[in-house]
Image (cartoon, helix red, strand yellow):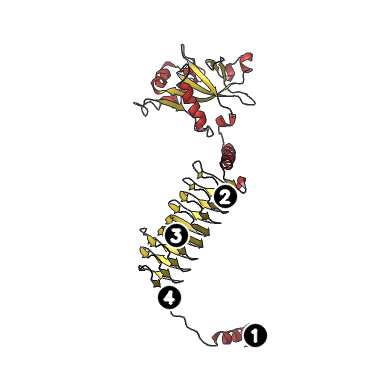
Amino acid sequence: DQLGTGHAVAQAHDALKGFAGDILILYGDVPMVSAETMRAMVYRLNHGMEPRAVVLGFRPDDAGAYGRIIADDQGGIEKMVEFKDTSEAERAVNLCNSGLMAVRSTDLFVLLDEIDNHNAAGEYYLPDIVMLEGQNSAVIEVDDPAEVAGVNSRAELAGMETEWQQRRREQAMADGVTLIAPETVWFSYDTEVSSDVVIEPNVFFGPGVSIASGAIIYGHSHIEGAAIGEGAKVGPFARLRPGAVMEEGSKVGNFVEMKKARLGKGAKANHLSYIGDAEVGEGANIGAGTITCNYDGYFKYKTVIGKGAFIGSNSALVAPVTIGDGAIVGAGATLTKDVAAGDLALVRADQTAKKGWAERFNKVSAKKKAGKY
């Protein structure tokens, strides 16, 4: 049963049994509250008059139907009242209740046991713990009301995401990141970007991405779960999937996909390749159209490419396979056996030439097309 916010918090009693510390009570539909604000709530709980509860207040441009907080000059709460129960004087107060709260674990459930549901809705209201007789509570104010704005529809959620993305972009640029077209870059909540990184337009970051200083992310790249080293280059039109690691100065070019693979220092895969479940050594070169054939329909296998190895274009490396340091694989190879360091591997049929064949073919075909043969 849903019996009010106080009843909802009380459901956490068993999960928090034995926990000793401070408890933050947040709302799942209030996504913008910052870590700084939460730290401020906990700090206030443990300093000054050390209140038993701290409420997060805010001052919106239009207080409307929000519940009001009546506080003294030191931030002590004298009264909290729902809008429908306010007097004219109380409605003139624009300090409103966000519903977010910090309470010590030793106090929370004791206080919840003391509130009742003697109200029109027959519900247990969390804010009632603040107004219990003899209770000592405090309010702190959030500077930006957007931090405590609630989401009630998918349209509002999209708007909130847009607002968060804009703040994240501004923070990135303040930290020394160059965004060529900021409004087109999409960050995850945990994207880590060092200073002096350049990000071109239309780049998407999924969770788990870190980018070291000096890297360049070219346009239309999609990156998630990847670590990009200092001075590395990604894209344009590249895709890095979880487990992709690019070491210092390495490069992944257009239409290259990496997954669960490491590209060594200075190694390159410039065009049209798939590198999955692979280890590519320092300075190796992966030619256009090369793929690591890592899956047999049941299991994944690993490809190892040594330092300074050169893989010719349009090669298929059928894992498990190892190519030694400095080895060369000729273009068009379907490789199923290991190649020793320094060796050349060629896997192709002999080329033959039929003298004059093309000339004769073209003459006959032209006559057929003209209806003369």
Q: Give the residue type at disc 1.
A: Gly
Query: What's the distance in space between the residues labelled 3 and 4, CA to CA?
Result: 22 Å
Residue corresponding to mark 3: 275
Residue corresponding to mark 1: 371
In the image, 128 versus 213, the foreground residue is 213
Which quadrant of the figure contains the N terminus? top left
Q: Give the residue type at disc 3.
A: Ile
Q: Give the residue type at disc 4.
A: Arg
Check the image and report above or below for 261 versus 115: below
User: Mark 3 vs mark 1: which is more N-terminal?
Assistant: 3
Check the image and report above or below for 208 versus 62: below
Query: What's the distance in space between the residues labelled 3 and 2, CA to CA?
Result: 24 Å
Q: Secondary structure at mark 1?
A: loop
User: Mark 2 vs mark 4: which is more N-terminal?
Assistant: 2
Q: Secondary structure at mark 3?
A: strand
User: Mark 2 vs mark 1: which is more N-terminal?
Assistant: 2
User: Is residue 217 shown to the viewer in this render?
Assistant: yes
